Each structure stands twice: as C-alpha cells, then as structure tokens.
Image (cartoon, rainbow, N blue to C red):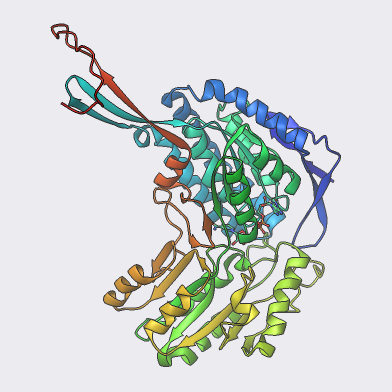
C-alpha cells in the first residue's frame, strides 16, 4: 500500500506518530493508501523549520520570489494531468473537473507572479516641512493553511502561492481524505527553486490542526472547510492571538424569474447542482422558481439530469463521479429518503444507484426534490451531494426574503432577462458572491473569494487583494531629512502637527 508522508524542509519526512489514516478510491471503495497523521511534536518541528526559513525568505527580494513563482507556473502547467489524476484517484471527481480545479488554482499562482506590482506601497512627499510618509506591507511570519477534501489542489493554491509571494513561510495541513495532490504541489515548488522550509506539508487530523492553532510560532491561519469547524478554527486561533480567515459551508440559491431563458436556466442548474457530485462549496443546491414557470423549469431540469452519466472519474465518458466516502454517500441518501415525509415531491431519486463491477464504490445517482419546505432537513442542511431542491415563490420579493433568511451567504445567482431586477438583486441579496445568469460565480484570481454570514468567519476574503492584505501587515514610515541650510528645529513639547 502507498504511504503519503509529510513534506517538511524541502524533503519527504516519514510520519513518526505511528498513526495513519486510510485513503480510499471512491470509485472502488478500496483503501489504496495510508496517510501519516502528525502528532503535536511533529507539528512543532515543522513550525520551527518554517520559522527558521522565514528569517531569510522574509527578507528575500521580490525578484527572487517571482523567479520561483514563474518557474512554478511552468511546472504546474506541465503537470496538470498528473495532478488531476491524483485528485481523481482519491477524490473521485471526473478528470475534466479535476483539470478545471488545477486551472483555477493556477490562476492564483499567476496572480502571485505579479506580486511586484501588488506590493508597491504608497508614498506621500512633503506632507509637512521636509517630511515624507510611506506605507509598506511586510510578511507576517509562519502561516498555516487547513484545507477541505473537495478541492485538494485548488484550495491549497488559494493560499500558499500568495502567502509565500508576500514573503511568509507556510505549513499546509491538507484533508486527510485525499492528501496526495498536496505533496505533488509542494514537490513542484521545491523543483521550481523554493528554498527548503518555505512551504511544508504536514498531514493529520484534529490533533495536527489543534497543535497549529495553539502554536505560538504560527502567526496566521487560513481555513476552508465546513461551518462548525470554521467556527472552531476562528474562535480558537483568535483566542490564541492569531490572524484568521475561516471559510465555511454553504447553501447556494439560484433565483429564476419568470422572464428567464428557461433552457439556459435549466442547463445552469443541472451543471451547478450536480457537477463534482454536488461536492462544491459553490454548488447550487436550491433553485427558487418565481411565478408560473416552476412546473416547466422542474421538467426541463429533470429531462437533463436523467441523461447525466455517473461512473468512475477516470472513465472519459463519465460526467459525474462517486462521493468521497460510503458514510457521506449514506448521509446524502438519507436526505432523499426522508424528503417525502417532510413534504417534498421526489422527482428523481438517485439512491440505490450503482456501477456494474464496482459495486463497492461510493455511488449515488442524481436526485431532484420539488416543493421543498424551508423547515425540512433537505433545505436547512448543507447536503454536499447531488441533490437539488426546488422551492417556489410567487414574487421576486418573496424569493429574496427566502434566500436572505438562510444562515449561509456564500454564493447566489439570479436568472433573468431584466437588467433592473438583476441590479436590484445584486444590492439586496445577502451573499458574498453573486452571479447574474452565471450559476457558479467563483471570482477570478484578482478578485477575492468569500461568503457572508456562516460561510466566512474573519474580516478577509481569500486571494485577490484581500489575500495579499491577509498575508501582510502594514507599516507607515514618517521621515524627516532637514535641508543642510535649515536652522535647528529646537525643542517643542507640543503634539506634532503638520506645517
Ligand atoms: P471539514 O470541515 O470536515 O474539514 C476541513 C479541514 O478541517 C480538514 O483539513 C480536516 O482535517 C480538518 N478538521 C476536520 N474536523 C476537525 C476538527 N474537529 N478539528 C480540527 N480540524 C478538523 O470539511 P470537508 O468535509 O473536508 O470539506 C467540505 C466542507 O468544506 C463543506 O462544508 C464545504 O462547503 C466547505 N468548503 C467551503 C469552501 C468555501 O470557500 N467557503 C470551499 C470548499 C469547501
């Protein structure tokens, strides 16, 4: 069986705790790999190595940093397929989807390649007599990144390229469910010329995470995962004096107005609800149909969903793969099985689906629930599987009120041909990312990603300008250089004011 070890100080470091976690191929259900789970002592060693590396990396030139990042970009580009294969083998998503994840991560590497212009700072000359003021941003030290299973390459790349471009050193604690892609990303960074200890991967579970949150050598924590854990990370890391951004779960709504192009809306709903088997934080999990279009829209979604081919991620004909674990598959199925008793109409029931010859895979088909009630479990919980709920309202206002009543506020979308309604929606809706006729509005790398309410704890969204701010701290330098001809200023006990 393959073993995934830590990557610390620019090399593989075998797990020393004696604890390992199983990694499963979701398409077969077979345990293919074991991943080392770090103890608090192993975390401490990694933090010390990252602290040592920070001494020189934090003072390295922007030219030295961007040289590494440009080389990294080329290596990632050349290794897209290899990374995507690792993702599919452990996560289960289809190869094309895994390639998409690598491409979106690469966007942030490209942003980091331009750190020279992003970190330019500000200068005001002659703010007072012979006085100039400059604002600069400096790295914060060792940053920890804790990432979820559903994007084993992209979410780490939301974090470490910008963090190291800003001069920090980094400890990545990937999901223990699909750990291999993280090691590949770190190995390629070393190959690109990143000095040892600047980017480290420490595998583990709650033990490793809590050791990072408690460690005085960790200055900041970036977290992406479920809402209960995001809350725990934010509370604990803040109490320990760290800067923290913790992105949580979601329930993303798509409001479809009566004037929308219903074929386009149905295409978008199916793509966004069932892509990656619904295991995306930006998946559409609730369609809100406004007015008399609901029956037609549900029928169009059903027709399309029925045609989706579910199968192994490495089969090029598959459009949707299995779920991450059998336990998660069973939990997702329980929402569909309990839906009718809570008032929904089960239009499509994907439970019980299997793939011939791979019956132990974590299979489930596509489910579509209509007339879902807002107090039902299927609506209230983040299901994180291929289950789309349809809710119905009579008016735009009722639809917006329904969406704004959700405790989550990650992404949302409106489908309409009415520019005025779309404009109103942008301003009225309580979510961090809004799509207009775009079902999955994941911002490009140079705009930041983040939700509102229970979908994000902390003040900074991730990547883009917010990411650069999060990974640096500001310093303002006030300078006076008297002219040689100036008479001495003399003693003045008054509070300094500009002259
Ligand atoms: P998760 O919260 O279970 O795990 C995320 C990370 O936290 C993992 O590295 C895991 O090892 C660690 N962890 C788990 N339990 C912990 C505990 N008790 N204490 C300390 N650390 C712990 O999330 P997941 O199941 O891996 O990922 C799916 C979730 O992530 C979904 O809720 C999804 O919406 C969310 N997500 C959010 C975004 C976003 O940008 N908002 C992006 C991707 C995924």
> For this view, does 322 lie left or right of residue 223?
right
Image coordinates of residue 160 in percent, x first then y, are 55, 40
Residue 297 appears in the figure:
no
Q: Quadrant of ligand 1?
A: bottom right
Residue at the location (37% across, 32% down)?
A: 116
Q: Residue furthest left?
A: 485
Q: Is residue 298 above or below residue 380?
A: below
Q: Is residue 358 above or below residue 456?
A: below
Q: Residue furthest front?
A: 493
Q: Nearer the viewer, residue 432 or 135?
A: 135
> For this view, does 413 lie left or right of residue 497?
right
Residue at the location (61% across, 60% down)?
A: 227
Residue at the location (67% across, 85% down)?
A: 339
Quarter assignment of residue 184: top right
Q: Is residue 81 above or below residue 290?
A: above
Q: Nearer the viewer, residue 209 or 311?
A: 209
> For this view, does 24 lie left or right of residue 153?
right
The quadrant of the image that shows the C terminus is: top left
> For this view, does 135 lie left or right of residue 400?
left
Q: What is the total number of numbered labels drawn onto the structure image?
A: 0
Image coordinates of residue 139 in percent, x first then y, are 48, 31
Residue 444 appears in the figure:
yes
Image coordinates of residue 278 in percent, x first then y, are 60, 68
Image coordinates of residue 487 in percent, x first then y, are 15, 8
Q: Nearer the viewer, residue 432 or 477?
A: 477
């Amino acid at each position: 069986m393959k073993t995934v070890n830590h990557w610390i100080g620019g090399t593989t470091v075998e797990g020393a705790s004696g604890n390992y976690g199983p990694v499963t191929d979701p398409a077969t259900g077979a345990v293919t790999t074991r991943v080392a789970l770090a103890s608090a002592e192993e975390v401490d060693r990694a933090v010390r190595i990252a602290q040592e590396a920070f001494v020189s990396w934090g003072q390295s030139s922007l030219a030295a940093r961007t040289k590494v990042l440009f080389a990294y970009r080329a290596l990632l580009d050349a290794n897209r397929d290899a990374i995507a294969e690792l993702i599919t083998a452990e996560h289960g998503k289809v190869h094309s989807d895994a390639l998409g994840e690598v491409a979106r991560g690469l966007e942030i590497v490209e942003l980091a390649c331009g750190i020279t212009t992003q970190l330019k700072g500000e200068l005001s000359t002659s703010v007072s007599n012979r006085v100039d003021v400059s604002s600069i941003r400096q790295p914060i030290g060792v940053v920890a990144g804790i990432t979820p299973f559903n994007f084993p390459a992209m979410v780490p790349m939301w974090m470490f390229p910008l963090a190291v471009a800003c001069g920090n050193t980094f400890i990545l604690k990937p999901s223990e469910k699909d750990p291999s892609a993280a090691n590949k990303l770190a190995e390629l960074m070393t190959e690109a010329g990143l000095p040892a200890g600047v980017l480290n991967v420490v595998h583990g579970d709650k033990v490793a995470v809590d050791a990072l949150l408690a460690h005085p050598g960790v200055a900041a924590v970036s977290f992406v995962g479920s809402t209960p854990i995001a809350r725990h990370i934010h509370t604990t890391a803040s109490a320990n004096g760290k800067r923290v951004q913790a992105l949580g779960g979601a329930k993303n709504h798509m409001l479809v107005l009566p004037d929308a192009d219903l074929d386009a809306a149905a295409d978008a709903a199916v793509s966004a609800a069932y892509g990656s088997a619904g295991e995306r934080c930006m998946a559409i999990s609730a369609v809100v149909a406004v007015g008399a279009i609901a029956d037609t829209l549900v029928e169009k979604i059903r027709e399309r969903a029925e045609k989706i081919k579910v199968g192994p991620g490495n089969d090029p004909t598959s459009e949707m793969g299995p779920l991450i674990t059998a336990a998660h598959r069973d939990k997702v199925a329980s929402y569909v099985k309990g839906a009718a008793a809570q008032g929904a109409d089960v239009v499509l029931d994907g439970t019980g689906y299997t793939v011939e010859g791979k019956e132990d895979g974590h299979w489930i088909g596509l489910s579509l629930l209509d007339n879902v009630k807002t107090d039902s479990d299927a609506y209230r919980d983040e299901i994180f599987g291929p289950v789309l709920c349809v809710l119905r309202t009579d008016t735009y206002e009722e639809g917006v009120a329904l969406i704004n009543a959700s405790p989550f506020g990650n992404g949302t979308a409106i489908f309409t041909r009415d520019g005025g309604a779309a404009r109103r929606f942008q301003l009225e809706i309580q979510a961090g990312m809004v799509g207009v006729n775009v079902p999955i509005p994941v911002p490009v790398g140079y705009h930041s990603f983040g939700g509102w309410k229970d979908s994000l704890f902390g003040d900074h969204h991730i990547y883009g300008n917010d990411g650069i701010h999060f990974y640096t701290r500001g310093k303002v330098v006030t300078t006076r250089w008297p002219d040689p001809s100036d008479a001495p200023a003399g003693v003045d006990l008054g509070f300094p004011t500009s002259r």
